[in-house]
Image (cartoon, grey):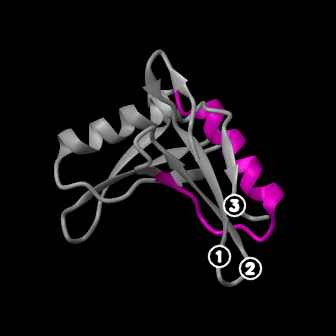
């Protein structure tokens, strides 16, 4: 699978997948195929696609990101919709600098319209 280039840089994309229990989830991947944001589990494909749509419209707004800390001290962030609902969560980071780079990557790649549907 080749993803598109934008200005010589590989563009990000969403990967939509089936979970073993029949639910649907997605990952936002950067151009290097690294997961930069993950979803919760959804009962139906339309709900997962609605969440992607919400990410696409909120990703560029820095105010929608909330930084958090796990009990083990590792950092992560969530992206919230304008109504305050969490619509995506990052993996854990070991430093604030890495966390900020993760946010910047989601801000850059989150508006992509490319969805690789692996559910079919």
Q: Do the residues bearing badges 2 and 3 touch, measured as CB atoms within 8 Å?
A: no
Q: Secondary structure at mark 3?
A: loop
Residue 114 at what x, y percent from top left?
66, 37
* Residue drawn at the location 65% of the way across and 31% of the way down: 57
Q: Is 87 located above or below residue 64 in the figure?
A: below
Q: CA distance from mark 1 to mark 3?
A: 11 Å
The earlier-in-sequence mark between 1 and 3 is 1
**Residue pushed farthest bottom?**
21
Q: Residues within 10 Å of mark 2 (few under 14, many from 20)?
A: few
Q: CA distance from mark 2 to mark 1?
A: 5 Å
Residue 97 at what x, y percent from top left?
19, 39
Circle nearer the viewer, 1 or 3: 3
Q: CA distance from mark 2 to mark 3?
A: 13 Å
**Residue pushed farthest top?**
7
* Residue drawn at the location 64% of the way across and 64% of the way down: 25
**Residue labelled with disc 3:** 118
Viewer-closest of 86 and 33: 33
Viewer-closest of 54 and 15: 15
**Residue labelled with disc 1:** 19
* Magenta highlight range: 37-60
Residue 78 at what x, y percent from top left?
45, 50
Q: Do the residues bearing badges 2 and 1 touch, measured as CB atoms within 8 Å?
A: yes
Q: Which mark is residue 22?
A: 2
Q: Residues within 10 Å of mark 3 (few under 14, many from 20)?
A: few
* Residue drawn at the location 40% of the way across and 42% of the way down: 32
């Amino acid at each position: 699978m080749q993803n598109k280039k934008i200005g010589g840089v590989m563009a990000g994309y969403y990967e939509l997948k089936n979970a073993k229990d029949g639910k649907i989830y997605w990952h936002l991947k950067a151009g290097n195929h690294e997961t930069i944001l993950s979803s919760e589990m959804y009962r139906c494909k339309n709900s997962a696609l609605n969440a992607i749509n919400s990410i696409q419209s909120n990703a560029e707004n820095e105010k929608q990101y909330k930084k958090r800390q796990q009990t083990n001290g590792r950092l992560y962030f969530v992206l919230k919709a304008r109504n305050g609902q969490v619509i995506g969560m990052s993996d854990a980071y070991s430093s604030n600098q890495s966390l900020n780079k993760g946010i910047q990557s989601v801000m850059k790649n989150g508006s992509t319209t490319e969805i690789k549907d692996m559910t079919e």
